[in-house]
Structure formats: C-alpha cells, structure tokens
Image: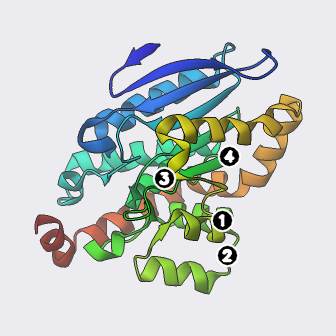
Amino acid sequence: MRKHTNLFLTSKTLPGGRSVATILTMEGEQENMLGLPLLSSLLETLHHLSTDASSQCVILTSAHPIFSSGPDVTILSDPTQPLFRQWYRLLASVHDALLTFPKPIAAAINGHCPSLGCALVLPCDERVMSAGPKEKPHMIGFNDGQLGMQVPPWLVANFCAVTGQVMHKVEKLLATSQMLSAEEAFRYGVVDTIVTHESGGVEGVVEAAIERLLPHLAVPSSSWLMTKAMLRGETTMAMRHEGYAKIVEVAWANSLGLRDVNERISA
C-alpha cells in the first residue's frame, strides 16, 4: 500500500495474472469534501498513474461511508476571492484528467455522492454503485439547485453524454435538484452496475468495478485509447478552449455570487 495525503493506493492482480489494477481510495477530510487538498492530491496521483507502467487500470473509491460530500462550501460562499478561481480550475482539471485518462478507470461508488461529487464519477469509463440499506438507500445526483447554485456547464455536458437522455429529461433532473437512488441512476445511465447492500461494502463495489473493466483490458490499449479519444474529443476540446473556459468560470462565479446562494450556504 502506498500512502499519499488524503488518499492511498493499493494494487490487485487481476484474473490471469497479466494485469494489475490500482485501487485509488480517497480518505479526505469531511467525507471527501472537494476542497483544495483532496483535489490537488487527486490530480497529482492521476497524472502519476497515467504513466505508471505497473498499473493497467484504476478504480476510484472512498474509505468513508460517503463517496464524496460535495464541494467546499466555504470557498463557494465568496466567489470573488482568489481562492475560488484556483479551486474552480483545479476541479475542472481533475474532471478533465478523469475524462481523458489513458487507461480504463472505474468509479466504485460506495455511498452517497451529491452535487459536484459527480465530477469524479461521470467522466469514468465504468460506474458501479452500492445500493445501500433499504431503509436508507445511497443517493447520487445534482442537488445544487437546493442551494441556489448551478451545475458547471462542462459537467452538464458530461451528464448528457453519459446518460444519452433527451434534453428535457436532463433539464428536469437538474432544475428540480433530484437525487437518484442506485436503481434510478441505473435506469438513467448514470451508473452501469448496482451492487446490493448484502454483497458487502467497499470490497463488493470494488470487485464489481474490476469485473466491469475486464472487457476494456481485453482490447489492445492503442485501439481502445484511440476510440475513447475520438468519442470524447469534442467535449474535451470545448473544455480546454481558453475562451470557453474563462466565460464558463466567470458565469458560474457570478451565479454563486447571488445573495440567495450565500444565504442558503450560511444557513
């Protein structure tokens, strides 16, 4: 096991003994709140793993009972501060690193994943979610509207691409801040596989994620990567276009600067 700030890495030899999966487990403060420390660690580690020849695929999961608690609201409460721009660009960079990761990567969602926690899930090649206990099922989705916030446009585009839903259905989910159970998320295409609560915690979700990645590993890496780059190229180019990125950043900051947002976050 390799320990890093806010996360740790473990390796698992896959069936057949020819490939090794890296389990990237987040253990950030406040149940993986997306603040600067965790985002910085994630970006650095993803860049390292992208060129690590000893690892053929990656599974992203959480050491906490929640996959991610969402954004650091102390930063969102004042989008005029210089720290906000640093945080926003770091979040977009982590999403971009996942979206363009040159190896198969899966999200093993072992708990709730509200708001911008979805930025760690949607760009992954496979998404496996624990259903949670029947009396309190795990939920995923964009509840940002409940705080008067908007979802960043680049994440909306990723959401549409992943679900393949017609716009009015996506609009309804986002406008009503609807959270989805694992079963509902599967029907929408947000997740690819559901793991029952009885199948066992993090280990069960990680094992299911590995199973989902095996078909990816069966394809020559060069052709797999070229196909992925072709299918995601338009979204990636738009995100990386400097003019577009700046417009989105300013517009989103302005939406967060509304008095209603600050009052709801402070409540």
Q: Are marks 1 and 2 in contact (CB under 8 Å)?
A: yes
Residue 121 in the figure: left or right of residue 167: left
Tell me which corner region of the image, top left, top right, bottom left or bottom right, holds residue 145. Answer: bottom left
Element on which disc 2 rests:
loop
> What is the distance, in whole Å, between disc 1 and disc 2 at their CAs?
8 Å
Q: Earlier in the sequence, mark 4 or mark 1?
A: 4
The number of numbered discs placed on residues in the rendered structure image is 4
Q: Earlier in the sequence, mark 3 or mark 1?
A: 3
From the image, tell me which residue sits under label 1.
189
55 up-or-down from 146: above or below: above
> What is the distance, in whole Å, between disc 4 and disc 3 at their CAs?
13 Å
128 up-or-down from 214: above or below: below
Q: Earlier in the sequence, mark 4 or mark 3?
A: 3
Scheme of image coloration:
rainbow
From the image, tell me which residue sits under label 3.
119
From the image, tell me which residue sits under label 2.
165
238 up-or-down from 82: above or below: below
Quarter that holds the C terminus: bottom left
> What is the distance, in whole Å, between disc 2 and disc 3 at their CAs?
18 Å
The residue type indicated by label 1 comes to Gly
Q: Position of residue 184 (x, y in %)?
A: 56, 71
Q: Earlier in the sequence, mark 2 or mark 4?
A: 4
Element on which disc 1 rests:
loop
The residue type indicated by label 2 comes to Gln
Q: Are marks 4 and 3 in contact (CB under 8 Å)?
A: no
Q: Nearer the observer, disc 1 or disc 2?
A: 1
> What is the distance, in whole Å, between disc 4 and disc 1 at their CAs?
12 Å
Q: Earlier in the sequence, mark 2 or mark 3?
A: 3
Disc ID at residue 125: 4
> What is the distance, in whole Å, between disc 2 and disc 4 at their CAs?
18 Å
Element on which disc 4 rests:
loop
